[in-house]
Amino acid sequence: MKNKRTFSILLVFSLIIITILCVKPVINNINFGLDLKGGFEVLYKVSPLDETEELTSDMLSSTYKSINKRIDTLGVSEPEISVEGDKIRVKLPGVTDEDEARERLSTPAVLTFRNSSDELLMNSDVLDSPGASLDYNQTGKPVVALKIKDNDTFYRTTKKVSESEDKLIVIWLDYDENIHSYETMKEECGTNNAACISSASVREAFSSNVVIEGNFSVQEAEELVDLINSGSLPTKLEEVSTKTVDAFFGTNTLNIAAISGVITLVIITIIMTVFYRLSGLISSICLVFYSLIVLALFNAIDGVLTLTGIAALILGIGMAVDSSIVTLEKIKDELNSGKKLDIAFNDANKRSLVSLIDANVTTLIVAVILFIFGESSVKGFGSMLILTIIVTVITMIVINRLALKGFLNLNTKLFIGNVKPSKKINFMKHTIKFIALYLIFVIIGIIFAFTQNINFGIDFTGGTSFTLKSEDDIQDTVIKNILSEYDLIDYSNIDAKQVEFRIKEVLDENEINSLKDAFDESNINSDISVISNIVKKDLTENAIKSVIIAALCILIYVSIRFKFNYGLASLIALLIDISVVIFTFIIFGIEINFIFIASILTILGYSINDTIVIFDLIRESKNKKENKLNNEDIVNDCLSKAFTRSILTTITTLTSVVVLLIMGASEIKEFNIAILVGLIVGTFSSLFVAPYVWIKLEKRDSMKPKDDYDDGPEEKIIKGINS
C-alpha cells in the first residue's frame, strides 16, 4: 500500500507540474478563429461556367485548390477552407483589407503560355477541363499530362516554338509584366510559390494531348497539376454569405472566454472538494489536466479554436466531471452496503465503467452528427466535443482512478466525505405534477407560436445582422441615421456600449463597405454577417436532418445496449427536453439561429448521458436475483441513489454556462440560454419522465397475452363426461 501511495502522490504532482509547465506553450500555439482574432469570412456557391454541365467533384476539388493558392498570396497565417456540399467556406483570421481578400479570392488564377522573351503565346482556353492530370511514362516516372481542347491553336503555337532558337515554352500563373520576367526568374521557375510554374523544351509541333516531362517526384508532379488546373477553372464563384469581425471583437471575446474557463474550474474544484474531500480535489486536478490535454490535441490536429469550440470545451469540463461523480457516488453506495473502502472502490469502478462508456458513446454520436451536418462554427463545436469525450475516458476514468488508488488506506471521511444512506424519495408520485406543468407550458408555447412571430435569425430568414461595440457609449440616433435607408429589426441594446440588430436586406460588398466606413467614422466597431436565401435553405434542411438522425441513432443504440423500452422512454424524455427549449425561445422571443440547433443536439447528447446512468442503475437492480421489488419500487430506490449525482452534475455543468452568460459572451448568448434551460429540464426528465415511461411500457408488455405453443392433441369436450 505504501508503494501505491507513493505512486499516486507522484502521479498527482506530475499532473500539476506538467500542467504548469505546458499551459503557456499550449495556449501560445492555439490557432484562433476569426471570431476570436477578427477577420473576414465568405461562403461561395460553386457552379460550372457552362450552365448545361453539372458540378463534379473534380471541379469542386480544383476550385478548392485554386482558392487555397490565392490565399497564399494574401499572407494569412491560419486560413480555414472547407467544402460544404456545393459551397466553399473561406475564413481568413487577421485579414484587415477585406476588399483585397474578396478580389483575390473570387478572381480565378490566370494561366498563360509564353516564350522565353515573355511574349504571350496561348492562355488556358487551349486546355480542356481539367487541363492537367498525373500520369507516368514508359519507365514509370511521373509526368504531367495536358489535355488539349483547341488542337489547332496548340499545334500552330508549338510549331512556332519548336522552330525558335531556345525552343522553350514557359507556363505562368498570374503573370505580371511589371514584376515578372523569365530572364530574371528562370532559376526559381517551378519552385514553391513562384509565378513561373514550368518551362519545357518543345522539339516538334503537337496537335493532340501532350506530357510535360522532368525530373519530378510524384508530389512535385501533383503540385504542378494543381497549379495548372487552378489557372483553368471550369467554375464560377457566387458569394452567398459573408461575415466581418473587427479585431476589437476578437480580443474582447477571447478575454471573456479565458476568464470564464478559469472561474468555471475554480468553482467546480470548490464544489468537488466540499462534497468529496480528497477524492474531489484530485478529480479537480485531473480536470485541469484534462483541459490542457484537450487543447494540446486540438493543436496537434491543426484545429482552429472558435468561440463555439471554447463553449464545447467549457461544457466538456462539466460533462467530464460527471464521469468522476458517477464513480464517487457508486463508491459511497458500496460503502453504505458495509464494504471496506478498498473493496468498495474496486467494485464501484467496475460497476460504473459500463454506464460511463454507454453515456459517453451516446454523446459521441451527437458530436459526430454535429461534425458531419454542421456548418463551419457548428462543425468546430462538434470536433471539440469529440475530443473532450475521448480525453474524458483517458483522464477522468483511467488517470483519475490511478491517482485515487494509493489513498485507499486513509480515513473514509477524508477520502470521500460523508457517507450515509440516501434518503428514500417517492419520485414516481411526483411525475404527474411534472408532466402537468410541462403540458401547461407547451399549451402556452403553442399559443405564442400562433399569435406572435417566431424570432428566427438570419440563418433561417436570410438578411444581414449587425453587432456593434464601442469603447464609448453608443447613441441610438447615430446608428439609425447611418441605417436610415433600411428597416431595422430586433434592435436591442445589450449594454450602453453594445448594440445588436438585423435588417431583411442581403447587403452586397459595396453596401457593407459603405456602412463599415460610416461606423468607423463614429468610432464604432462592427461585426456584420450576411446570409443569402441559398444558404438559408441548406441550413434549414441540415438542421432538421441532423436532429432527426441524432434522435434515431440514440434510440437504436440505447435499444441495442439495454432494451427497446429503455430506448423509447429515453427518446420521449429527450423530446420533452427539446420542446421545452423551443417553446422557451418562442415565448420569450429569443432569436433562433443555427447555433441554436447545435445547442439542441448538445442537449440531446447531455440529457441522454444522464438518463443512461439512471437506466444503468435500474437495469443493474432489476437483474439482481435477490431483488423482489416491483418496477416502481426499483425505480424509486435507484433514483434516490442517483439524485445527488444528478443534481451535482447539473450544477457543475451549469456553472460553465452561467459564467459565460454573466461574463457577457453575447456571440453565443442563444446557445448558452438553450443549454441552461435544456440542462435543468433534462435533469427533471431523466429523474421523472424517462423512468415513469419505462414503467408504463414494461407494464404494457407484461399484460400482453402469451401465445399458447402446445401443439399436442386437443381434448374433445363430451357433454356429461368432461364438460
Image (tube, helix red, strand yellow):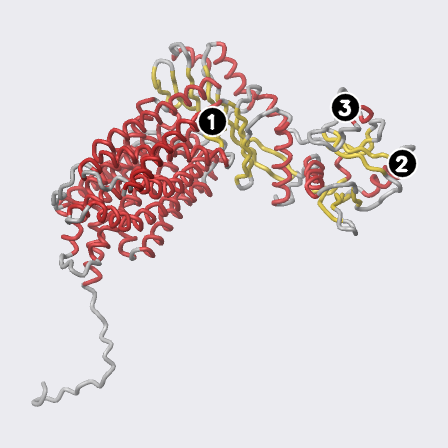
**Three-letter amino acid code of the residue under disc 2:** Lys
Question: Badge 1: few (under 14), some or many (20 or more) residues near its Cα, within 10 Å?
Answer: few
Mark 3 highlights which residue?
A: 180
Helix, strand or loop at label 2? It is helix
Kindly indicate the quadrant of the structure image that contains residue 114: top right
The CA span between labels 1 and 3 is 41 Å
Q: Nearer the viewer, mark 2 or mark 3?
A: 3
Q: CA distance from mark 2 to mark 1?
A: 59 Å
Amino acid type at circle 1 is: Pro
Q: Is residue 300 left or right of residue 352?
A: right
Given residues 614 and 701, the one toward you in this image is: 614
Nearest the viewer among 714 and 294 is 294
- How far apart in space, not on screen, are marks 2 and 3 (Cα)? 23 Å
Q: Could you tell whether 317 is left or right of 376 in the image?
A: left
Q: Position of residue 380 (x, y in %)?
A: 45, 35
Residue 56 at x, y percent in the picture: 62, 45
